[in-house]
């Protein structure tokens, strides 16, 4: 004995099944998307990594600067200034990504690059230059709440 199901009831059942599948798929997609989306901790960690990279780049420069002052190793005033500019761009990238930091935070470290460039142009003592780099690295550590290994 076959049961006759009117076409309207079949259509209704098909629409309800399709809607239920759409709702379930939407909920599963939303939950999965939220679970895999980067959180605030991930964003902070990325910014901190950028800041550490900039500080690490700065820590390498005193060796090159000493070579430039003594005329060894093929380093020059321009290569040192270029290295400072590169480190400054790295730090600017960190500041750009750190939307929670104000311009006041940037003003803590920004003037140091001009001072360092002036020291390079004047050919000041490598020990003084290294001390200024160390101060800047410590400022980066404070602003970005990081610990840069090997800080002088």
Image (cartoon, rainbow, N blue to C red):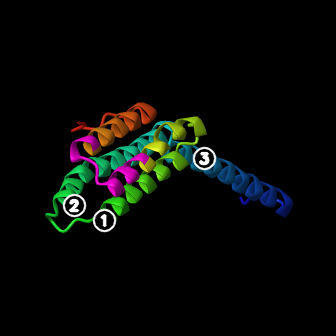
67 lies above or below 119: below
What residue is rendered at 85% in x and 60% in y? Answer: 8
Question: Is residue 65 highlighted in magenta?
Answer: no
- Can you tell which mark lies on residue 126? none
108 lies above or below 57: above
Q: Which residue is mark 1?
A: 79
Q: Position of residue 49 (x, y in %)?
A: 37, 45
113 lies above or below 1: above
Q: Which residues are magenta?
A: 115-128
Q: Quadrant of the C terminus?
A: top left
Q: Residue furthest left?
A: 72
Q: Which residue is mark 2?
A: 68
Asked whether 128 or 91 is in front, the reply is 128
For marks 3 and 2, give the CA distance: 57 Å
Determine crowd level at label 2: few under 14, some 14-19, many 20+ residues with C-alpha closer than 10 A.
many
Disc with the residue nearer the chain's start (1 vs 3): 3
Image quadrant assignment for residue 151: top left
Disc with the residue nearer the chain's start (2 vs 1): 2
Question: Left or right: 61 with respect to 45?
Answer: left
Q: Position of residue 17 (x, y in %)?
A: 70, 53
Q: Which residue is mark 3?
A: 30
Q: Nearer the viewer, mark 1 or mark 3?
A: 1
**Tag 2–tag 1 contact (CB < 8 Å):** yes
Q: Secondary structure at mark 3?
A: helix
What residue is rendered at 49% in x and 45% in y? Answer: 38
């Amino acid at each position: 004995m076959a049961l006759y199901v009117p076409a309207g009831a079949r259509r209704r059942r098909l629409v309800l099944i399709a809607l239920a599948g759409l709702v379930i798929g939407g909920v599963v997609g939303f939950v999965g998307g939220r679970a895999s989306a980067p959180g605030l901790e991930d964003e902070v960690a990325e910014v901190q990594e950028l800041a550490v990279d900039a500080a690490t780049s700065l820590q390498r420069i005193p060796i090159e600067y000493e070579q430039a002052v003594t005329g060894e190793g093929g380093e020059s005033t321009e290569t040192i200034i270029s290295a400072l500019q590169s480190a400054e761009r790295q730090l600017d990238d960190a500041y750009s990504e750190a939307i929670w930091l104000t311009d006041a935070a940037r003003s803590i470290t920004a003037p140091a690059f001009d001072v360092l460039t002036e020291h390079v142009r004047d050919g000041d003592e490598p020990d003084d230059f290294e001390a200024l780099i160390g101060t800047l690295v410590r400022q980066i550590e404070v602003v970005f709440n990081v610990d840069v290994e090997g800080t002088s």
